[in-house]
Image (cartoon, rainbow, N blue to C red):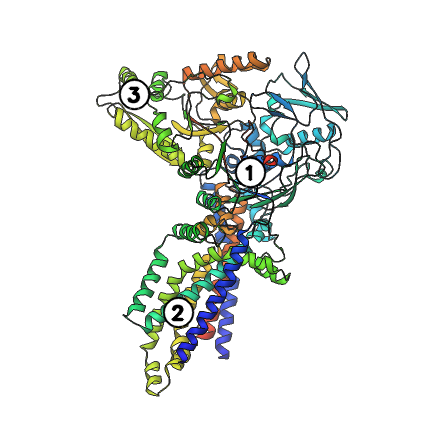
Amino acid sequence: MKSNIRNVLNYALIKISLIPLNLWIISSLIFILLRIAPGDPIDAILGSGADDEARELMRFKLGLNQSIQIQYINYLKNLINFNLGDSLSNQEPVMEIISDALPATIELGLFSILIAMLIGFPLGYMGLKNKNKKYDYISRIIGISSYSIPPFWGAMMMQLIFSVILRVLPIGGRMPITGNPHNITGFFILDSILKNDFDAFLGSIYHLALPSFTLGFLLSGIFSRSLRSSLEKSYKSDYVDAAICRGINERNILLNYALPNALIPIFTISGFAIASLAGGALLIEVTFSWPGLALKLQEAILQRDYNLVQGIVIVTSILIISINLLIDIIIAFFDPRINY
Amino acid sequence: MHKLKYLRKKVYITCTLIAIFSQYSCTKKINTSQNISIASSGKIESIDPARANTLKAYQLLHALGDTLYELNNEGELIPKLAESKPIISKDKLRIYIKLKKNILFHDGTPFDSSSMKFTIERFQNIGTLNYILNNKIKSIETPSKELLIINLNNPSSSIEGILTSVNLTPISPNFYKDHFDKFLNDNFIGTGKYRLKRFSNEIQTLSPNVSYWSNKTKNNGINFIGYNSSSTLYGAFISKQVDVLLSNSIEDTLRAKLNLLDQKNNLKESESEPIEISFISLRTNKIPLNNINIRLAIAKSLNRQLIRNKISFNLRNSALSLIPLIFKKDNSVSWPDFDPKESIRIFREEGYCDGNIFNLPLTYRSNVPTDKLIAFYWQQSVKAEMKDCFSITINGVESTTIYKNLSKGIYPAVILDWTGTYSDPEAYLSPLLSCDKFIRNNCLKGESVYSGSFWASEKVEKLFKESDNLTGVERLKKLLEIEKRASQSLPYIPIWTSSQKAWSQNYISKPIFNSAGIINMSELVKNEK
C-alpha cells in the first residue's frame, strides 16, 4: 500500500512537472491558430465602416501593429507572470472576465453531473436488475435518447414545457431580474448560504434548475450505460460467484463486491464528463443565457478577441489537466492493481 | 410491508419537494417589482459612450443620458441639453452652441461647456467610432459655462447630425477624470432621466433620476435583460416573464408570429422608421462586373417582392434606394426594379445566354440568417426565371472575415447591411460612395473600398463637397443627386429596409420609437394587470 502511494505521488509529480510543457504547447497552438484564422479583431470592433487610418490607430492601441514574433514573445512573457492581458474588445483584464464566468460554469457543471448521476445510476442499476424486462427497456430507451438528443433541441423543449407552457421555471439567466447576487465567491448558491439569504438561495436554485436538469439528463445516459456494463461485468466475475456461494446476501454483494470494482471505469468516465464540462456546455449556456465560460469563449471567438480566447483556452486546459490528474490519483488509490 | 413503507416515504419526500418548489415558482410569477422588464438579444459589453457601438448600448445610454440635440421624425434638430439650435459662422468653420443652465449630472456636479468639451475630446481620444468625426473638429472653446464653440477644419454639414450621436452623450468630468484615456465599462454618470442602479453584462437596472431637469419618468424604473437566443426571447415574452421585447435581431418567423398576436390584440407591436438598409455590394473594378450593363442585368434579376414575402413575411420594406425614406421626405424611386425579361435581353446583348451562362459568385454572412435566405431565394428565383442566361453560386462566410476581406476585393458580390451612425442622409451615402483617391471610376482609397464596391465618381465627390457648404433642402437635393448617380452606376443593389421593433404586453403602454430607432423608456407605463 505504502509503495503504491509513493508510486502515485511520483506519478503525480511527473504529471505536474509536465503541466508547463503542456500549457506551452497549447498556448502556442492557440496563438498560432488564432492568427492564421481569417478575420481581424479590428474589423470586429470597428465594423466595416472605418477607414484605414482608424483601423491603424486601433491596431496600434491594441498592440497588434507589432510583428507576430514580438507579440508571441510578449504573450509568453505575460503568461509566465500569470498575466493573461486585457480583452481586446472591452479592455478589461482577461483574468477578471474569466473569474466572473468560471464560477457560473462550475456551478452548472457540478449540478449537472450530480443530476446525471442521480438519474443515470438508478436507471443503469434497475436496468441490470431487470434484464430484458420492461424496466430494462425503459432504461435503455432513456439512456440512448439522452445522448442522442441534440442539446440545443433538448434545451428548447425544456424551455417550452417548463417556462412557456407550465410557466414554473425561468427561461434563462442566472438570477431573478430583481435579485441582487452576493458576489463573494462567484458561486451564487454558496454565496447566498454564506450570506444567509434564503431568497437569493432559492432564486439561484430556481434559475439553475432547468439548465442543470437539461444538461444532467443529456449526460445521464453515459452514466447509466457505463454503470450497467461495469456492474454486469462485475456480477459475472469469480469473486461475486464465490460470494454467492458463501451465502452472502444480495445487498452486501452489490455494495461490498460488485459495486466497488464496477466504480473504477465509472470514475474514468466521470472524469471525462467533468473535464468536458470544464470549458462549459456551449449550447446549454447559449440557450439558457447562462453567463458561463463557453458563452464568453463563443463571443470572444466571434469578436476575434485574441487575448480572451487565449486566456479561456489556457484556464480550461489547466482545469482539464488537473481533473484528469485527480481522477488518475483517485483510481490509483482505490485500485491496487494499477501500477504507475 | 417494508417495501410499501419505503415507497410511501419516497412519495412523501417527492411531494414535499414538488410542493416547496411549485410554491416558490408560483410566488415568483407574481411580479412584485413595479419596474418594467425589457428584454433584448445579446448583452452589453460596455456602457461607456465612447465604446458603445450597438443599438442595445445606445438604447441604454439614451435612457441614462441626454445628447445636445435630437432629431425629430421630420428630421429637424431639436435642442435637448442645448438651449437653442446651433449658430454657424459665415465661413461655416465655427459652431456656437448655447447650453441649458442648472442641469446636474447624477453625481451632483453641474453640466456645462467644459463637461461637453471633456466628452467630445474623450471621444476623439479613445472613441471606438471616433472616425465619424474624421478630423472634422479642429478645437473646442469654452468662453463661458453656457457657451460651447466648435472650430472645424473644413465646413461640414454633417456635424449637426453628429451632435445627435449617443456616442457624444455628456459625462461627468469629475467622475470620469481617471478614465479620460480608458473605458469605464460598468458605470455611467450622465444627466439622463434614469440613474444606473445595477450593471452586469446580462442585466441592467435603472432607477428614476428624481432631480432630472425636465419631465420625469412615467414608471418606477427599468430592468433591462439580455437573452442569447431568439427562442429564449420569444419564450420569455410569451410567458410574460418580461414586459417588453425589444429586438431587431429576433428571427423573422418569430416576428411574424408576434405580428399575428398583435393583430389578435394579444399584445402591442410598434416599430421605428426603417433605418437599416440591406444591400448587395458589387465589385466594380474587375471584369465582368466593371461592365455597367452586367450590373444592370443583375439588378433587374432581383425579385424583391419574393424575398420580402418569403423571408420577412411582408414585414420589411423592399428598397429601391440607399437612403431610408425618413431622410428623403419624398418617395423617389431610383434603382431598377425586378424585370427578368429585360435582364435576359441585356445578358443576351452582352454575349451571354444560350449555353454561355453568366455566373455570379454571391457571398453572404453565414452568421446572419436572413442573408442566407436572401441568397438562397435569389439563387432559386434566377434558376426558375433565367436559367439559360444567369446563375448564382452562393457561399457563406462569417461576417468578421467578410469585413476583413472586403477592401481586398475578394468578393465579386456580397450581401451587407448598414445603419447610419447618425441620423442624416449623408450617413448612408458617404460610408458607401465616397472615395479619397481614384482613377476614373476605380476607387483606390476610401469608403467605397471598405464597402467592397471600389466605385468612384468625380462628380459624386464634387457633389459631396458642395453639400458640405449647404444646409436644408438645398443640401438634401445635392445628396439625392449623389444617390441618383449611384443608382445609374449600380455599385450597390438595395434589397430592403428594416425597422426596429418592440412588442409590449397589453398591460404596458405601447413603446414609441424616435427617429434613431430608440424607444423612449421613460414613457412606458405599467397598468394594472
Camera-side mark, 1 or 2? 2
Q: What amino acid type is highlighted by mark number 3?
A: Pro
Q: Answer above or below: position of A269 versus B191.
A: below
Rendered location of residue B356, percent (x, y): 24, 23
Same-chain status of marks 3 and 2: no
Nearest-to-viewer mark from 3 and 1: 3
Which amino acid, by three-letter code, is at mark 1? Leu
Mark 3 neighbour density, 10 Å: few (under 14) some (14–19) many (20 or more): many
What amino acid is found at the position of numbered circle 2 in the picture?
A: Pro
The image shows residue A326 at horizontal and vertical percentages of: 49, 66
Q: Earlier in the sequence, mark 1 or mark 2?
A: 1
Residue A338 visible somewhere in the drawing: no
Badge 1: few (under 14), some or many (20 or more) residues near its Cα, within 10 Å?
A: some
Relative depth, front residue between A332 and B79: B79
Give the labeled residue for mark 2: A122
Compared across the picture, whether B204 is left or right of B144 comes to left
**Residue receiving disc 3:** B340
Q: What residue is rendered at 74% in x and 29% in y?
A: B112
Q: Position of residue B86 (x, y in %)?
A: 67, 19
